[in-house]
Image: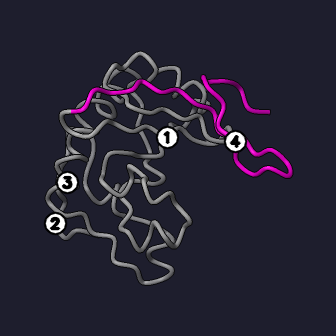
Amino acid sequence: MPGGPAVQLSCNFYLYEFERSQTAARFGIENRADAEVIDNLKRLCADVLQPLRDETGMPITVTSGYRSPELNRRIGGSHRSAHCEGRAADIVIAGMAPLQVCEALQWNMQVDQLIHEFGEWAHVAIARDGDKPRCQMLTAVHEPGHGTRYRLGLEMVA
């Protein structure tokens, strides 16, 4: 298990869920969170993910959590990615469409950024400690010839 013994972040979330990565395993990248990142992950869980879990009563799968700088580079992530600070997670909930997950989160005033990504998952991020959340809602889509585009608001992706 990454991170050694099971470190509990909240009632239903553990550190290993945020550190595991198929890409890191494939390329032998160490993807371990430091104390500051763990503090951010605890806030993410306490303020957003655990309340969502409690509201829906359904397990949440973290498909991408913390990303070390090397892992973030390998996957082509933004150098400003909140994932690198432990302030973001990409999530899915079995039995719920990603847009439904986003809609369940859009009322949480602790959310800094919420992205309905390609109709496949929800990206949720919190602000840096002490900053006011932007409550930014976006939809990411592939546009032929243009790559990824971000539209304001949450919408269905065809």
Q: Are the residues tagged 1 and 4 within 8 Å (C-beta)?
A: no
As drawn, 155 above or below 20: above
The magenta segment is 131-158
The residue depicted at 19 percent of the width and 60 percent of the height is 6
Q: Nearer the viewer, residue 88 or 129?
A: 129
Q: Where is residue 80 in the image (x, y as percent from the top left)?
A: 42, 54
Three-letter amino acid code at disc 3?
A: Ile
Q: Is residue 75 visible?
A: yes
Picture disc at residue 123: 1
Can you identify the residue that label 3 sits on? 38
Three-letter amino acid code at disc 4?
A: Arg
SS at mark 2 in the image: loop
- Nearest to N terminus: mark 4 or mark 2: 2
Q: Position of residue 88 (x, y in %)?
A: 38, 45
As drawn, 51 above or below 140: above
Can you identify the residue that label 4 sits on? 149
Measured Cα–Cα span from mark 3 to mark 2: 14 Å
- Nearest to N terminus: mark 3 or mark 1: 3
The residue depicted at 63 percent of the width and 33 percent of the height is 139
Q: Nearer the viewer, residue 67 or 143?
A: 143
Picture disc at residue 56: none
Tag in front: 2 or 1 = 1
What colour scheme governs how the chains and residues are painted in the rendered image of this protein?
Answer: one colour
Residue at far right of view: 144
Left or right: 145 in relation to 100: right
Three-letter amino acid code at disc 1?
A: His
Picture disc at residue 5: 2
Q: Quadrant of the N terminus?
A: bottom left
Measured Cα–Cα span from mark 4 to mark 3: 31 Å
SS at mark 4 in the image: strand
The quadrant holding residue 12 is top left
